[in-house]
Amino acid sequence: MIKNYFKIALRNLKKNRLYAFINILGLTVGIVSCLMIGIYIKHELSYDRFNQNADKIVRVTMDYNFGGESQKIAVTGTKVGPQFKRVFPQVVDFVRMDKRTRVIGYKDQLFEEKNFLYVEPSFFKIFSFKLVNGDPAAALSANDKIVISQTAAKKYFGSEDPIGKILKVRDQNFIVSAIAADAPSNSQIQFDFIVPFNVLDAAKTEEWSEANYITYLLLKNKDDIQPLQKQITAYMKVVDRDEMKITGSMHLTFNLEPLTSVHLHSNLPDGFEPNGSITYIYILIVVAMLILMIAGVNYVNLSIAQSAGRGAEIGIRKVLGAAKQQLFKQFIGESLLVTAIAAILSVALAFIMLPFFNRLSGIQFQFNALFDPVILLCLIILGVIIGFLAGAYPALLLSNVKLAKILKSGFSFTSGQGVRRSLIIFQFIISIFLIISTVVILEQLSYIHNKDVGYNKSNVVVLPVDYKMIPQVDALKKVISGIPGVQSVAAANNEPVDVKWGDAIHTPGGTNLTVNALPMDEDFIKTMQLKIVAGSDFTQTDVLQIDTTHQAKNFHYTFMLNESAARALGWTPEQAIGKEISKNFPGRIKAVVKDFNFKSFHDPIGPLLIFLDHFQTQDIFVRINGNNTASVISTIAKLWKERVPYRPFEYKFLDEDYDALYRAEQRTAGVFTTFSALAILLACLGLFAVTAYAVVQRTKEIGIRKVLGATIANIILLISKDFLWLVIVATAIASPIAWFTSHKWLQDFAYRISIHWWIFIAAGAASLLVAGITVSVQALKAALANPVKSLRSE
């Protein structure tokens, strides 16, 4: 019996090649979309869960207010970990970490490494990173030991055994004590080199508020998180406020974030890597399901459309005694067969599409990810569910038809046309929703890219600097300034695209204000082309007045504020000039700069303090004219090698780091663009097939109309109008849904576009145009047919 069902199913697929092709193609695209997105979602949801203690590890974050608005950051001072272990019995152990960029030397090799970690010896006890060579207990037992990853071992030592070899970091030699397996891609903590935290000067003292370090706690029990949080909040209220250097209404406390929720649920800055977003996971799930629903709708629609052609088959089967259940099983079996073929093809297509998907997602998935047991099981379950859901309605429809009806008037359904139209509308609702959402996302990204952020980020080359270079930064700036094509050179502690330094300032009147701070040199304002609204720029005279003699007894700053900081202190820009404020040391305000976006567009512009400080330099900024970029960079590289032989030449462009702030949004735009195109393609394929069926059904009518004088245009209009109005209805339904979801997404940005009315008109018009072309192809074919032939065959 099953064998016969299988033969009949294959025969029907062969007989109706067009419908079979569209069904299989649609389901393949839908399943491969779910497959690829499923791989990505599984990866994101599995972040840090490879750790055996994952449910007992928490990250400590800081919540403080030194005046103005409260700030929450992912870093803490050095005292948090050890003090909490001493005070709270629920804390088994702690690890403080700091991630830096370091120049590593081995023999005559020099490389700048970005994944360099300072950690406590408890690191390998708390986290489940594996050592392929070495003892976890002894790997970081001395300050001259270093653990390297397998990738780093191959890079520096090739086939040699690295254990016992010497690596030079800054001015210190480290002995390779262990080789660690490369950190999994679903880990927040990525490393190539690990050395003891005690190497840092900061480890010699314990401070609450000098927040530069990531702190994790290992708890006795996963249920201790909430009780411990309450105890920490209460404890920080009674800690000696003099020790924390806070007064009045200021506060400083700490919060706990479960390790496994940090990646998708935390939006705090200063973590080890940019976080993901659970919102985008939900979006991807919805998009995948929408694509799959369009494919399923195509199947249902085409199955109903083909029903009339199977009247004789069903009639004969019923005359020969076929039961309703037998017919139902046959049609469900056909649906499962089509779905099985699509599932197999989807795996093959996934192999082809994986490199493209890797570029889209930003994660380098390997081909073996497609054979993950969980993914394969989900694929099988998904295939069975799709087969039943897509085939259930047509199967019930076909198996329940009355034999007398078939024998009397043939096989047709009065309700079939309404169902088909409803399903077409549903398909285009999804397609138009995705198109509108895509346009809104692209508009917001264009707004971010083109909006005046208050400084000029174009044609700026960023050169990283280390502590050893600071004494020669001025000389290096001078020689770089002389290169043809270089317009200006400056130095600062941080890039203006994402200022991370948090601080506080005080006025003589007792006002305190929490600010972000940006140490810079006297050339930074003009190099970045920041706008001064009151006062004047820093000069060399201001630099010479910085007195660092007598242990900085007479040290003072020269400050600038942004407009938001001046406003928060109750001053206009003009009133702020000459006012004295203090940041540990006093100084006077020389200028107020126009507000500029020193963080991403997700955050409103807050108070910013700018001050002269040559000792905090971490980057040199070179503004070039952009006419001969390669030549300028080549010349800078040559000078660099001559003057900084102990450090490899590394550079990047400022606008690249600016764009990197919006990587998640760029990926979302890529996903929506891709799947919107697929959605409209599948909807049009379904429309094409249904139109083809409708034309066949109306062959006699079209022939008669042509004989009676109907023109080609009349015939095309006759067929097209029955379908194109469905797209108009879909646009009317999809538009408010798309507006609501797009509006909610835009609320995540402090600076955002308005959703323009023309987006909805354009999306509807584009869908109408594509649908019109799709329908017109079949309509034109019918209009050009010889009416004599069609009437004779009828």
Image (cartoon, rainbow, N blue to C red):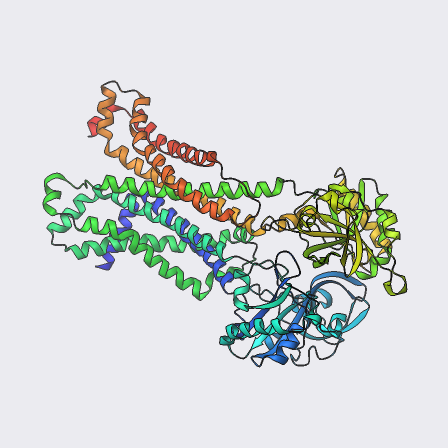
Camera-side residue: 296 or 241? 241
- Count of numbered circles on the image: 0
Answer yes or no: is residue 216 visible. yes
Camera-side residue: 538 or 507? 507
In the rendered image, the quadrant that contains the N terminus is bottom left
In terms of image quadrants, where is residue 766?
Answer: top left
Where residue 517 appears, x then y in whole percent? 72, 55
Q: Is residue 87 left or right of residue 386?
A: right
The residue sitting at 74% across, 39% down in the picture is 626
Q: Is residue 466 left or right of residue 655?
A: right
Where residue 174 appears, x then y in whole percent? 77, 73
The residue sitting at 61% across, 42% down in the picture is 449
Q: Is residue 285 left or right of residue 150?
A: left
The residue sitting at 22% across, 19% down in the picture is 708
The image shows residue 443, relative to residue 114, as above or below, that is: above
Where residue 390 appears, x then y in whole percent? 30, 51
Q: Residue furthest front?
A: 509
